[in-house]
Amino acid sequence: MTVTNTSGGPIDRIELEAIAARLGHLALGPVTVDGRRVVPTVADQTITVPLGGVLPVGAVTTLRLSFRATLRSDLAGDDWLFTRTNGIIDAYRWLPWVSLARPFDRPNYGDPFYTASSPHVRVAITTDRRLVIAATGRHVSTVGLTQTFEAHDVRDFTITASPYYRVSTAHVGSTTVRLYARSGFPVSAVMRYATVALRREGVLAGAYPYGEFSVAQSAGGDGMESPELIWLPRETAGSHLRWLTYHETAHQWFYGLVGSDQARQPFADEAAADMLARTASHIWRPSRCPTARLDRSIYAYSARCYFEIVYVQGSRLLDKIRARMGSAAYWAAIRGYIAAHRHGLGGTRLLLETLDAGTPLNLRPLYVPRFPSLF
């Protein structure tokens, strides 16, 4: 990987995030920085690579890493993020990526991630049998058992694959939508959900920025998002499947286009995405937990109430702000926030301040009780 120091100050190391380090018993091979061997350390999901010196602001360095990791064979705990089961391979955030160290363990299923956007990624995947692969980015070639993909302006690179996938195709404007599923999956319904979600959410938040959008039936676990790709577990059904398709699609804007510290500021990621999804799908419901603060990290919410507070209460608060501002002003401010931080990093305070600046009304009284550490 070629890394440019845009941190604002000199650095002497690079921290890389890789779920394979936590779930796949990752073992590093040789690692070099500008051709010189270095000795990295692996702790939790973070690989820390010393640069052997100081990299000034704006300077560029090249890292080369080799590693081995083993896919899990079950869906227990978080294993579904990096597994080979039910005839499907799921590999989420397996490719080491520039990040900051965040603990993987949490008391809920919050996303313990914080990644920068890469302008160009090229990945060649060689398998020992023919697999149909759904991946972040665009498929550019197949030579024998090697398939190559390219992606631009993405925060991670995810794949799911199966020898049993059947691929269905539709179009939303200039975007090609592909659905990867095994027999028995509700293909027609999911394709309808995905195309309508992409169209409606694009009207509200701004045009979907990529030429490809893939929806893949995953081995199991929970729904999950990646740039240009979402996972829907094979057992999901009914109205929950419809909401989940809209919600994971909404992540193409929040954390896809505008990144954030998903571990420490889940509101900027999950509440913003959920409000977009619920507005587009018209699926709303009250929270099943007491009203609580929205400025905590994923490590501070219980498993029972994380979703109810951050997703449900968070999206309802944003909808209350929308009603106070007016829909036109609210969505204009959201599009402004996305434009200002496109392919960069936003956050909870930046999002709320953008909304406040988008109206002559004072929104601070709505913010103070829910975000006491920020306002």
Image: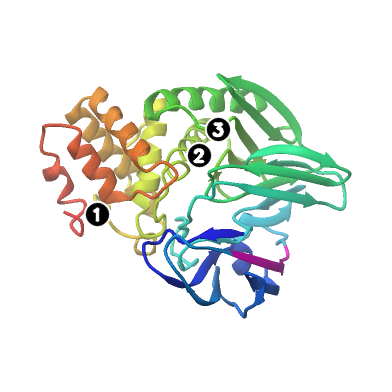
Does the magenta run of residues contain 162? Answer: no
Mark 3 surroundings within 10 Å by alpha-carbon count, few (fewer than 14), some (14 through 19), many (20 or more)? some
Reply above or below: 174 against 354. above
| First of labels 3, 1 by sequence position | 3
Does the magenta run of residues contain 64? Answer: yes
Query: In percent of the image, x 66 and y 42: which residue is there?
Result: 150
Is residue 348 rendered to the left or right of residue 68? Answer: left
Is residue 55 rendered to the left or right of residue 160? Answer: left
Residue wearing tag 2: 248
Q: Viewer-proximal residue, 309 or 358?
A: 358
Q: Are marks 3 and 2 in contact (CB under 8 Å)?
A: no
Q: Amino acid at mark 1?
A: Arg
Q: Amino acid at mark 2?
A: Glu
- Magenta segment boundaries in residue numbering: 62-70
Reply above or below: 194 against 342. above
Q: Viewer-proximal residue, 273 or 227?
A: 227
Residue wearing tag 3: 210
Q: Is residue 291 visible?
A: yes
Residue wearing tag 1: 293
Reply above or below: 304 against 20. above
Mark 1 surroundings within 10 Å by alpha-carbon count, few (fewer than 14), some (14 through 19), many (20 or more)? some
Is residue 92 rendered to the left or right of residue 89? Answer: left
